[in-house]
Image (spheres, rainbow, N blue to C red):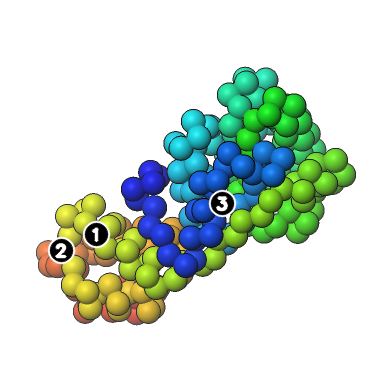
Amino acid sequence: MGRADFFVSPANAAALAAVEGWAGWPEGKLLLAGPEGSGKTHLAHVWADAAGGIVLPAAALPGAGLPALAEAGRVAVDDADTLAGDAAGERALLHLHNMLAEAGGRLLLTARRPAPAWGVRLPDLASRAEAAALARLEQPDDALLAAVLVKLFADRQLPVSPDLIAYLTARMERSLAAARALVAALDARALAEGGAVTVRLAGRHLAAGG
């Protein structure tokens, strides 16, 4: 989840630039929106490392100590859109927003969609979320998927060919989560068969619905 492991491509370059400019966010807040598996959580951790912030899953927010979070000054709420419709979650996010705004802190929200599409019931929270600057992450492109696959195989000390990487990027689900799952599955299959991770093995795996 570190910056060194965050590969930059046209799919995420603008979002990375917005996150790295955290000191100048309008009203001290930014909404990072993108589809599942596009790297939102990773980018939130990159920001937290750079800004000295905290990354909190949205599900943990209703039971969190809001004054302590506000005192930390820089907080990322991951999957903030999942709080929509949850009365306790919406109230907690609204209070955290107000506390950080009063203290001059920074608030990063990640979500699958822009705030107007969340379905928030609290009008005050809806207006505050919609007022946040918006940065978008797109689905990973071929360059990003290839870089991630190469690193994931290298982390497992699995030698693979450029042909395999090209074969996978052309056929796999386009998400970083899918890349992790695919590399793990191919590693397990190669180990079970006592062979290497090859295009042939990958073809059998994908043909079987992997």
Mark 3–mark 2 Cα distance, whole angstroms, equals 35 Å
- Which amino acid type corresponds to the residue marked 1 in the rendered image? Phe
Observer-nearest of 132 and 111 = 132
Task: Give percent across and percent down for residue 9.
Answer: 43, 65
Task: Give the residue at the far left of this rendering.
Answer: 194
Upstream in the sequence, badge 3 or badge 2?
A: 3
Q: Secondary structure at mark 1?
A: helix
Question: Is residue 93 something one can see in this rendering?
Answer: yes
Dividing the picture into quadrants, the one containing residue 73 is top right
The residue under the point 74% across, 27% down is 102
- Which amino acid type corresponds to the residue marked 3 in the rendered image? Ala
Task: Give the residue at the far front of this rendering.
Answer: 24
- Which amino acid type corresponds to the residue marked 2 in the rendered image? Pro
Q: Quadrant of the N terminus?
A: top left
Q: Is residue 22 above or below residue 176?
A: above
Observer-nearest of 69 and 181 = 69
Q: Secondary structure at mark 3?
A: helix
Task: Give percent across and percent down for residue 12.
Answer: 49, 61
Task: Give percent across and percent down for residue 194.
Answer: 12, 64
- The residue mark sitting in front, 1 or 3, is 3
Mark 1–mark 3 Cα distance, whole angstroms, equals 30 Å
Q: Is residue 118 above or below residue 146?
A: above
In this rendering, would 70 be left or right of 124? left
Q: Quadrant of the C terminus?
A: bottom left
Q: Which mark is residue 159?
A: 2
Please name the residue that numbered disc 1 is placed on.
153
Q: Which mark is residue 18?
A: 3
Dividing the picture into quadrants, the one containing residue 164 is bottom left
Dividing the picture into quadrants, the one containing residue 200 is bottom left
Upstream in the sequence, badge 2 or badge 1?
A: 1
Q: Is residue 75 above or below residue 32?
A: above
